[in-house]
Amino acid sequence: MKALPAPDVTLLLPVIDPLKYPDYNSKIEKLQKDTGLDEGVLAGVCEIEGNKCVVAVMASEFLMGSMGIAVGEKITRSFEIAEKLKLPIIIFTASGGARMQEGILSLMQMAKTSAAVKRYSENGGLYVSVLTHPTTGGVSASFATLADITLAEPGALIGFAGPRVIEQTIGQKLPQGFQRSEFQLDHGFVDQIVARADMRDKLAQILRLHAN
């Protein structure tokens, strides 16, 4: 995968702390230093085997890829740049859901990113979602599962609430493998399961097939 310059997508966004959450800013600063990332998603314009596209990758090492204001803005801008450049977009998701430290503003990113997907789709864009382990919470309930083509890695946990939470809520035992990618494939929520070693070839094939 070859990265190309895309300043509008990779623009650094400031940390926003609407709730003045204790130690939130210092935790973000430490994560930025430790990971080399500015936030929980990295985005840019790339080439996959010569096929140009916008790619966004969520980082589980950054507060478990939780979606706050900055992550929602980056995802939204990624769709806007893809639409402007008339490029396909691929998003690799890995998230525990909305970022509790930013309160209701983090939940608003679900609607914001979903609206970005809708605008992009209405203008004929190709969106491929790659669900990795885990893809849960507000991310799974918004842009992650709104793609034209949805791929998943083997054994990935995909769902809104975790199995233990659901079992405690309904007081019943869930089926074996519930919410894993294989279960989601069997029930029509995922188009194909692709191992990470085979992912580049599969994505390149999809991009070639939809080149026009």
Image (cartoon, grey):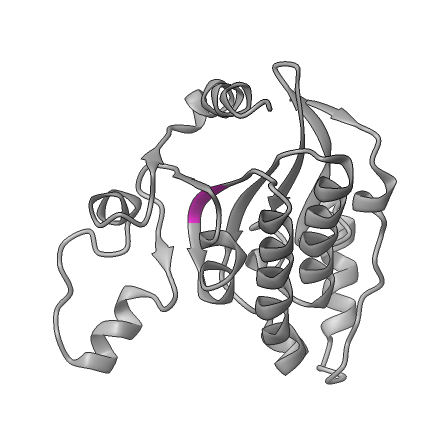
Q: In the rendering, at what x and y percent does residue 78 appear?
A: 71, 47
Horizontal placement of 185 versus 32: left or right? Answer: left
Q: In the rendering, at what x and y percent does residue 37 appear?
A: 74, 47
| Residue at 21% from the left image edge and 56% from the top image edge | 178
Please determine whether, in this image, residue 17 is positioned above or below residue 9: below
**Snapshot quadrant of residue 89:** top right
**Snapshot quadrant of residue 47:** top right
Relative depth, front residue between 198 and 84? 84
Relative depth, front residue between 93 and 30? 93
Please determine whether, in this image, residue 81 is positioned above or below residue 202: below
| Residue at 71% from the left image edge and 40% from the top image edge | 82
Please determine whether, in this image, residue 23 is positioned above or below residue 79: below
| Residue at 33% from the left image edge and 44% from the top image edge | 190
Hey, which residue is sitting farthest top in the picture?
50
Q: Which residue range is magenta in the image?
A: 129-133
Residue 59 in sight in this render:
no
Relative depth, front residue between 142 and 16? 142
Q: Is residue 188 magenta?
A: no
Q: In the rendering, at what x and y percent does residue 19 appear?
A: 73, 85
Horizontal placement of 139 versus 102: left or right? Answer: left
Magenta span: chief secondary structure: strand
| Residue at 84% from the left image edge and 30% from the top image edge | 5
